[in-house]
Image (cartoon, rainbow, N blue to C red):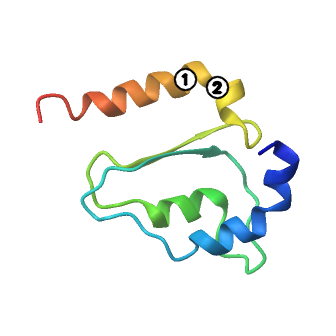
Amino acid sequence: MNIGDEANQIENNIARTVNISFPSDMPVLFFTTREDKVNEDKKKSNVTFYQTQLTDFPSSKTITYEGHHYLHWTHYKEISEQVNEFLKTFEGN
């Protein structure tokens, strides 16, 4: 799949995942863009949406970066460091 196909399928992809949730005992780490935009109903930005998806697991969190959707292209070093720190919280378990 290329980026164009991904863009063409975004509505279908969202519809397929809208009711999916993570188990409450699963640690979740989200990376997203730092945006002030809110959706059509003026209630949620991408950050607040991800925060509603976080589990109660103590290390679950959302990390924001300036940039576009493909943060892994522009912030790969920072993301790598954050993932390593996140994984360290499970050492010894």
Which residue extends farthest bottom?
A: 41
Residue 54: image x %, image y %?
Answer: 41, 59
Q: Residues within 10 Å of mark 1 (few under 14, many from 20)?
A: few
- Residue wearing tag 1: 78
Report the residue at 72% width, 51% height from top.
35
**Left or right position of 92 against 71:** left
- Secondary element under disc 2, as helix, strand or loop, is loop
Residue 16 falls left or right of residue 36: left
| Place of residue 53 in the rendered image (x, y in percent of width and height, measured from the top left) | 46, 64
Dot 2 amino acid type: His
Amino acid type, label 1 = Glu
Question: Above or below — where is 17 with respect to 29?
Answer: below
In the image, residue 93 lies at what x, y percent? 12, 36
Query: Residue tagged by mark 2?
Result: 75
Q: Quadrant of the N terminus?
A: top right
Closer to the camera, 60 or 23?
A: 23
